[in-house]
Amino acid sequence: MISVKNPISLTPITTLCLDFGNTRLKCAIFRDRDMQELLVLPDDSEATIRELVSKYHPNRSILSSVIDHNPAVEDILAGAGSFHKLSNKSRLPFTTPVGKPETIGADRLALVSAAVDLFPGKNTLVIALGSAITYNFINKYKEFIGGSISPGMEMRFKSLHAFTAKLPLVEKDWNFPLMGYDTSTNILSGVILGMATEIDGIIEIYRQKYHNFNAVLTGGDAPYFVYHLKNKIFADPNLIYKGLYAICEYNNNNDV
């Protein structure tokens, strides 16, 4: 677990954890270790970030970005308090004994940090369901070994539409049958149940190889799959923000 220099404080420390993904820009607000609020930002303009800083008065902030964001974001956050931009050069609570650690996405670094912080001493597979599915394995020795990447739900819907002549672009939906009764429900069943079977299969492969193993499900699309998985695994839609907080804490603690 992360150690804290000043465990007793009359004034809570406010931390902004920003996650700029391919689909949306989000910001989680923490008071000490407690996540208080989650915002979806309309854009990364200077006005939006200044308004965010003005409202929450952060003591510190951290940014995970997988897009070409507005560079002024970093200057504004740095001017408001202690700021950290997550990258492969960040101090992390785990090691990355892989061939090219510089190619690991910032979002995956945050997810693995959360696993180390929340599940110490375990072999953990973090499955993130977003634009893509990422499988991220961290062993009990705090080594991020790697994992795999496959197409996400919307990517599969768009592929079926783009690479065929007549299949429609289907919107994701909770309500669909095992056996579709029209084209749209056939696609829903095929994509969502197909992905659930894929996830279950990969979990089982890891479970057979590693003892003291657990799997965690996260990401914006996670709710669509929780009830379709045979493996009843822990689901936390806010895992990436908890990981960003852990990294921010790690980089602001001189005792680590």
Image: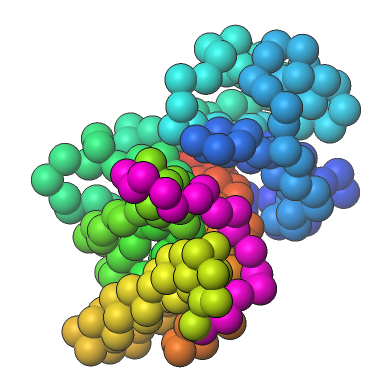
Viewer-proximal residue among 50 and 13: 50
* Secondary structure that dominates the magenta span: loop
Give percent across and percent down for residue 17.
Answer: 63, 40
Work out whether residue 177 can be spotted: yes
Q: How is the image coloured?
A: rainbow
Quarter assignment of residue 224: bottom right
Q: Looking at the image, which residue sits at the far left?
A: 99
Give percent across and percent down for residue 217.
Answer: 50, 69
Give percent across and percent down for residue 187.
Answer: 47, 65
- Residue drawn at point x = 59 percent, y = 58 percent: 172
- Residue drawn at point x = 70 percent, y = 56 percent: 33
- Residue drawn at point x = 60 percent, y = 53 percent: 171
- Specify whether residue 101 is painted magenta: no
Quarter assignment of residue 103: top left
* Above or below, 25 relative to 180: above
- Specify whether residue 165 is painted magenta: yes
Viewer-proximal residue among 198 and 13: 198
In the image, taking residue 116 as reference, residue 201 lies left or right, namely left
- Residue drawn at point x = 29 percent, y = 70 percent: 139
Give percent across and percent down for residue 83.
Answer: 59, 26
Tell me the magenta residue range.
Answer: 163-178
In the image, taking residue 222 as reference, residue 88 lies left or right, namely left
Viewer-proximal residue among 172 and 252: 172
